[in-house]
Image (cartoon, coloured by chain):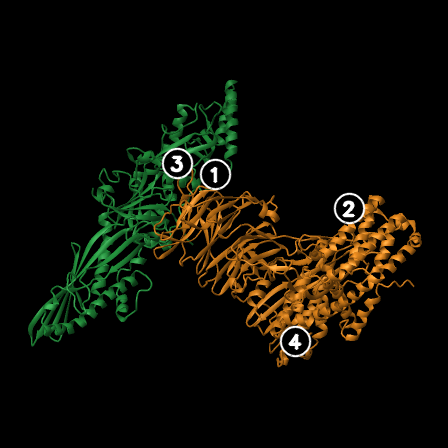
Chain colours: A green, B orange
Amino acid sequence: MKGNETLAGYDMVLALSQNTINYQFSQLYKRNIIHKKWGVLGGKNTDGKDIHITEQDAEFKQKIKDWISLQNDIEKARKDNNWEEIGNLMKRRASENLNLTFGWDSTLAAPEVSFIKDNTKEVFLEIRFKTGKLYYREEETKAITVFNLKDSVYAFRVPIGQLKVKKEQMILDAGESAEKIIRESGLSYEDFTIQSLFLNFENANISNFDKSKSTLPSGSSEAFQNAIANYFNMTVSGTDNPYVLGYGIKRKKIKASEKAMFQPTSLGFSTSYSNKNKKPGDFSALNFLMMLNDTKPPTTTTAGILPKSLIELGKDTSSSTDGVFSIQGNHFNTYLKSLDDYVQSTFTNLEGVQLKHGFQNNVMVLTRHQKKKDDTIDTTFTITKESVKNNSNNSGISVRYKIEIHVTVKVHAWFIEVGKKTLSTNGKYTKDEIKKKGSPGYLDFTIKAGKTGRFDLDHKLTEPNIAFDENPNLFGHGFWNDLLSILTIFISWIILTVKAIVNQIATDLGKQGAGSSSALIKKLNAIDVLNQTNKVILPLGKVYAFKNLRIENKEDIVAYDIAYAPVIEK
Amino acid sequence: MKVDPKFQISKDDKVTVDFKSELMQNYFPESAIEAGTTIRSLMVTPEQPFIFCLTKDKQLQGILRSEGSASGWIQLILSKGEVTSFELEYNTEEDYFQIAKVEDNKVWVSDEIPLDTTQFETLDKSLSWSSMQAVNTNEVINKVSIGIEKIVFSTTTKGEDAKYYVANLDDLTPKPCTLFENGMKIIQFELGNFQYTNGVFMLYDIGKERSFVYQSFPDERYGKTTKARFDEEKAINCFALVESDDTNDIVYGAGKNIHQYISGIEEDTVDVIKMPGTFEEIKRIRAARNGDHHSVWSLNEKGLHYQNNQFFDQNLQQFIDNQWTHPIVMAKDAEQFCCVKGKGIRNRLFAINTKHGSELTQLWQDATTTLWNKNTLTIKGIDSLKEVESYSAHIQFRSKATKTFQDLQVRLSAESNLFVYVNGESYHIGPDHEVSIPLGVSAEFTVICPVKDIASSNIILNANFLKKPVAINLSEQVLRNLEEKVTSGEALANARKQNGNLLVAKGTDPALLNSAANGIKEMLSVAKTVENGTAFSSNSFGIGTSNQTTAARSIVNSSNIHQGLTLGDFLHSVWDSTKKAFEFVVEKVKDGVKFIIKIGEQIFNWIVKTIREIGHFIQKIFDAISVFFKDLFEFLAFLFDWNSIVETKNAFKDFTNEAIICLKNEIKNIRKYVDDTLDKQIEKFSPELVDIPDSLHKADPSQPSKEAPADPRANWLNSKKNYLHDSSGKPIKSQIPTDFTDVFQSFTSQLKEILVKSGEGFKLQVDIIFDGFKKMIQGELTFLEFLKLLLHKLAGLSLFLVKQLMDLIFVSLDTLISIAQVGLNKQWEIPIITPLYKAVTKSDELTFLDVMCLFVAIPTTILYKIGEGKAPFGEGKTKEEFINRGKTIFQLNLN
C-alpha cells in the first residue's frame, strides 16, 4: 500500500483515540472548565422573534417560577371559562416576555463523543444530564409539564468533515508574536488541543440535534421533542451565539512556537471507527488530517477516509499513549535526504576532496588527487547508504552509510610511470605501515524521537581500514622504498580524514568529549551544516510527546505513538 | 493528692516576684542529633515539626518537637536496619500522612498516621508497616515515592536499565510503569497531584535534553492519563512539590532559575511564575507553605538561598503578599535540608552538613522580630554534656500568707518567640505561645534562654495569684554593666575580659572606637526607651564614618535587590561582620522605634519593637571593632570557676571522710542522747503543731526554707535537680551504689512493721522522715537538722514506737557507716555532673562521695565568690582547718 492510500490523500495524520478525547473532556468537566450548569428558556415574543434566555441570566430562576405560576393561572382561568382573565394574563405574558414554550434547568455530567461505524465525517457529541428539570408548555393555555432530566442525553451530530481550520481565522485569534509565525508556517499547535476540538464540537452553528440518539425524559411528547430539535437546528443555529451548548471554553491566545521541518499548513478532520480487541474506545480515532507546504488538501470522495484506524498500528497502546502520528514515507525521506546532505558535507568539507556525484541510488562518490613531486595518489570514496530500518525494539530508526575507499598510487621516475599500485578497503595484504587488512567503514545513525518534536540523533563510526590489493612482498625492493615514502604522507592523511569526520559529527550532534579542537575541526564548524540537534522536525511538540519512532513498510508511512502532553510554559 | 484551694496562695496574698537574670554558661545532658542523607519534614500541629532523616547508621529516624521534654526534641527510630530511601505523603484533605521506606530490599508502607489522634511521642512503638518486594529477586530497590493512592519504586539490576513499578496502596502489588517517551534516564521522580489527578512527576534526560513531566495514573472509566510537560528556557536540575489546599501540588522547578507552577482552579491554565534571581546551577530545592505564604530554599555552589512571597515594603513597613523576594544566602555549609513554615516561628530550616559532623541544625525565624536564630537539635543523653551560652533567670514567688504555692501554675510567655528551658524542660514561648509551669512548695524556677548575642526579649510571667503580668528583662543587668563599662572610646580600648586579655585588639583606630562607644551608648539609651515606652528626640550617629551627622533623614527609595527583606533577613544575610562603616538615624514612632540604616549608598529602614533587635544592633557595632559575641561573653558573663569548685569539693570530701570516722565513734553517744531526751523532748511539742493541716502533709520542711534572694548562679545546681532525679527514667535511689540501697531496703522493710503498728495515717510523716534521712546521708542535711526533723515529725507517736524507730535508724546508720568508706568511694555516673567533672578535671573518676561533695561545693563556691570575690579555699591553711573540723562535726554540742 502506498503511503498516500494509508493516509487517504493527506501528508500527515494525527489519530487521537476516542477514549483520550472523552477522558480529557471528563477532566475539563472535573476541573469546572466545562460548565456544569445549563439552563435554557425558549419561546417567541410578540414580534415573533425568538426568546432565548440562559442560566447566565440573573433572573433565570425567577423567570421559571413566574412562567409556571402564570401558566397555572391561565389554565385555571380557562377551566373557569374566565376569558377576560385569560386576556389579561396573556397581555401580562407578552409584556413580561413569558411566552415561553420549553426550558430546562440542569446540572450536567461530563460530555462524551462517540464515533460512528462506517461514518467518517460525523461524530456524536452527547450532553449528559446528571440532574435537572425540563419544562414544557404543551398548549398555550395549559399549565407547564415538568419532567425529570436525570440520565437524559441530548445528542448532537457534529459534521466534523466540514470543519476546516483556516489561516485567516487563526491570525485573528493569534497574539502579535504568533501572527507572523502562523502566516509563514500555517497552523499553530493550539489547533491540536482538546480545547480547540471542544470549541469546534460545541459550535451549534454546524451541529445538529439528533432526536433518535438522544434520550429524553419518558413521557415527553413527540411535539416536545420536535420543539427541542427545532430549537437547536433552526432557532439557534441562526443566532450568533457560539456557546449555545452551555460551555465556556475560550480560545487561548496563540503563542509563538518554532516552525517544524514538517509544519502542517492545513487541517481537516475525520474519524476512523475500529473495534479492534472489541475496544472501540481505545482504537477508534479522531484524525487530524494535515497537508504540508501549502499543498491543497485532496478533494476526492475518499479523501480523509482512512482504510483503518492508525491506532491499530500502535506499538504502545497502554494508558501512557493517546494515539498514533503518521507521515507518508516519501515526506519522511525529506528528513533522510537532509541526513544524506549532512553526510555529504562532512566529506566535502575536507580539504582537497571533490564531489564526483552526490547520493544517486543511495551511492555518493568523492575523489581526491594528491601529488608529491611527480608521484600521484588518487583516492576515491564511495559512500553507500546501505539501509534505513527500524531498531529492534521499535525505539528508533537506524540509518547506515558504508564507506569504501580506493587508492591508486602511481610512482614516477623522470615523468615515466614506473609502477602503479592500489590500496582499498577490500585489500587483503599488509606490510610495514599498513598493518591491518582492508575493511569498509560504517557511519551509523539512530534517529529517536526527542523532546517536543526534536529528533535525537545518535551516531557511531566504524573506522575504515585500507590495505594493498596485491601482495607488496612481490614488489621490487627499490620500488617499495619509493612507495613507502609516499605512503607515509598518505597514511597520516587517511587517519586525519577519519578523525575529522568523527570529530565533526561529534561536534554537530553535541556529544561531549569530541576530541581535540584542531584547526581543521574549527574550520568544519564554521561551515553551516544542518544542525540536527536543534531543529524541530515534528510539529505539535508543544501539545504531544512522541514515542516509538518507526517505519511501517507495509503502509509506507513513518509512525510514532503519541501522548497528549501539553507544554506548560510562562 | 490535690491541694485544697483554700490552702493555696491567691491574688489577695500580696505575692512578690523576686528574680535575677544572669548571662552565664549553662550545661545540659544533651547530645547533638546526627543525620545522614535525605531529610524531610512536616508540621504535625501548627508549631510542631516532625523531621525524618537517616541516622549515621542509615536507620530511619523521626525527630519530633516535644514541648516540655528535656531537650525539646525526641528521637524515634523507625527501622531495624539500613534504609536506602524513604518518603512522606501528607493528605491535606483527610489530614493524615504515611511513610514509605526501602529496607531489606523491600518497600514498606506505614499505616495512615492521622494528625489529630496520633500519639507521636510513641509512634516508633505504635506504627505498623506492610511490605512488598520487587518482581525479580535480583532486582535491587533503590528509591521509593509515595502518593495518596499509589506508590512508585525503582529497581536496578546489574547491566540493565532501571525499572519502575507502581502499586496501589490498598494491595501493594507492583506493576511495571509505562512512560510516554523513549530512552529516558530518570533523575528524580516523586508522586504528587496535578490538575486534580494524582500521578508521578518525573525529571529525566531524553537524548541530550532534560525533560520535566507529569503523568497521572490511568482513570477507571477510560484508562487514560493526564500528561503535561513543564518547559523552561534553561534545563531543570531538580524540583520540589508542596501540597496545596485544593489537593494539587505547587510545583517548583529549578535550574538557573526557579519557576513556580500552580494549577488553575476552574480555568484551564497553570500559573507559571518565574521567581526573581538567577543562579548557578541549583542542585536541590525545597519549599514550604503556611496558608498562602510560601518559602523556597535552593542550594547551589554559592550556598543555600532563601526567598519567600511576603515582600516587606520598607516604606509602608508592612508585608505585601504574593510578591517574591530576591534570593539571599542563608547558609554556606548546608548539604541536605528541608523546611517548614509556621506562625510564631515563621520559617524553619533543618539542615545537615556531612562534611562537618552531620549535626542536624535548625535555622528559624521569629515572627515578631523577624530575627533568624541558629541552633543544633539535641536529644537527651545522660552521658553527654552540652555547653550553652544563656541568660538564666532565677524566679521566686513569695508571700507572707501561711498558704502554699503547691500545685499552682505560672504561665510563661515572651515578647518574641524563644526556645527556653524551664526546670530542665524545653519550651517554645512567644507572644501567642504560653506554657504553664507548675509550682512546688518552694515556688521557684529557673528559665534558661540560650543566646547567640547579648540581647534577649522580655519574658512575661502571669498567674492567677498575680495581680498583673510581670515582664522580666533578661538582659537588663548585662546592658547596665555594658553601659558602665563602655563610657568612651578609651574605656573600650582599655577594657579587659575576665581572663585578663584586652577586649579590643591593640591598635584599633581610636576614632573608630570613639564612634563605636558613642554608638553603643546611643543604642543603650534607645533600649531604655523601648523598655519604658518614653519619648525621645530623634538622633543620628555613625560608626566608622568620617562625618557622622550626614545620615539621610528622608529615605530615598533606593531600588536595590535587598528590597523586600525583613530586618532579620537583612541582619542574617546581608549585614555580615565585615561591615565597618554605617550610620543610624533613630526616631520614636507610634508603635516602636524607627531605625534608618545607611550602609554605603544603601538605605534601609525598619520599625523595631523589642530590645532584642537593639541588642542585635549593639552586637553589629561590636562586630565593627572585631569584638564578637564570644568576646563579649567573656567580658560580661558570669563564668563558672570549675577549678575552684573542684578544690572546694576536695575539701568537702576530706572533711566528710574525717566526719564519717568521727560519726562512727559518736553513734553510741548520740543514741544515748536520744534515749535520754526523747521523753522530755516530745512533751515540748504542742498538740497543734502535731495537728498539721492535711494539705500541708506534702510540705517538706526538711527542705531548708532559704530566704536567700533569687540568683540563677547560686541556684544553678538546684535548677538541674530534675536531671538528677529522673535522668534515665529510674529514681535516684536506684542509682545510689548497691551497698547503700541494701541498707535502705532493709530499713524500709523494717520500717513497714513499725508503720503497721502506728497506722497508715502516719505514713506521710514517715515519708518525710525517710526523705530527710536520705538527705542527711547525701550530705544535704546536717545530722542535727535531721534529728530535729525526726523528733518534730514523730511527736504524737507512742514513745514505744519512736524508740523502736530510732533503734532501727541507728542500726541502719551503723551498718551504713561501716560500708560508707567503701561505698562512698565507688564510682558513680550521673547526668551533667559526671561528664562536666570529667571535662574539667580532664580524667578524674567521680565517686559517690565526690558527687555529694560537688553538690555542696558548686553552690557554696559560687555564693562565696559572689560574696567574697574569691574562692573559699584559696589558701591552704583555711582548707586544712576546715577538714579538721570534720573530726568534731558529729560531736553533739548540746550546750
Q: Position of residue B404 (x, y in %)?
A: 81, 52
Query: For mark 1, what is the residue?
Result: A56
- Separation of residues labelled 2 and 4 (CA atoms): 54 Å
- Separation of residues labelled 3 and 2 (CA atoms): 71 Å
Residue B503 got which mark?
4
- Separation of residues labelled 4 and 1 (CA atoms): 78 Å
| Image-quadrant location for residue A468 | bottom left
Labels 2 & 4 near each other (Cβ < 8 A):
no
Answer few, some or many: residues within 10 Å of disc 3's Cα (few below 14, many 20 plus, some between 14 and 19).
some
The mark tally for this picture is: 4
Viewer-nearest of labels 2 and 1?
2
Output the chain of dot 1. A
Q: Which amino acid lies under the numbered mark 1 shown in the image of this protein?
A: Gln
- Separation of residues labelled 3 and 1 (CA atoms): 23 Å
Q: In the image shown, does A333 or B89 lie closer to the viewer?
A: B89
Same chain for labels 4 and 1? Say yes or no: no
Q: Tell me which label, 3 or 1, sits earlier in the chain.
A: 1
Q: Position of residue B765 (x, y in %)?
A: 83, 49
In this rendering, does residue B796 appear at all? no
Q: Which amino acid lies under the numbered mark 2 shown in the image of this protein?
A: Lys
Answer few, some or many: residues within 10 Å of disc 4's Cα (few below 14, many 20 plus, some between 14 and 19).
many
Answer few, some or many: residues within 10 Å of disc 2's Cα (few below 14, many 20 plus, some between 14 and 19).
few
Same chain for labels 2 and 1? Say yes or no: no
Viewer-nearest of labels 2 and 4?
2
Question: Image check: B332 left or right of A160?
Answer: right
